[in-house]
Image (spheres, grey):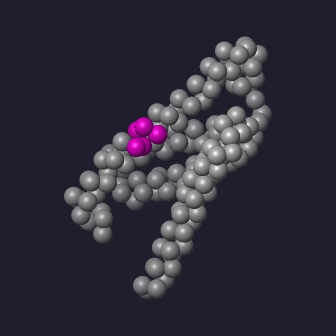
Amino acid sequence: TLFKSSKKFNYLYSPHHLLGKISAIFIIFHPFLLSVRFFYRSFQRGISFIFHNHLGVIFGEIALVGTILLIVLSLSKKLPKNFWKFFHKLFLLIFILIICHILFTKNDLLKNISLKIYIYSIMFGSLGYIIYEKIRKKISKNINK
């Protein structure tokens, strides 16, 4: 398997780790950059952006906190492999929260129909692939028993 061959694992780990770092930076700075935009328009809009009760933004905040927590936990070098894999699997829950965040948040970018189709295709295509892989693995485990 892939994990038994350390050469193949290292070949995939390095780009995976780099992509994780870049994604983490964008994810963490996303709400701060948006708040600057709202404060630039008016102080009242900035305050209403921070103190809100909009469902889509709440999904985003939960996903942000969960992402930061999982990143910190999964970076621990002393974690046994099964815990490390478990923390990575929890990113599926975060991904679902991100989908809810995108679906329930009003977004100026999604007014562009081409961009909306692109983002939704990536979002639901990724989710479909994850579900497909979960089902495929369960079926192959049952067949191999």
Magenta region, main secondary structure = helix
Q: Is residue 113 left or right of residue 21?
A: right
For the N terminus, the image quarter is: bottom left
Rendered position, 24 above or below 11: above
Q: Is residue 40 left or right of residue 73?
A: right
- Asked whether 113 or 127 is in front, the reply is 113
Q: Does residue 68 show up? A: yes
Q: Residue lying farthest left?
A: 7
Rendered position, 72 above or below 3: above
Residue 65: say if magenta: no
Residue 61 % position (x, y): 64, 37
Residue 47 % position (x, y): 73, 19
Which residues lie in the magenta part? Answer: 19-23
- Point 60% across, 54% down: residue: 121
Residue 114 % position (x, y): 64, 46
Residue 118 % position (x, y): 60, 49
- Point 58% across, 38% down: residue: 64
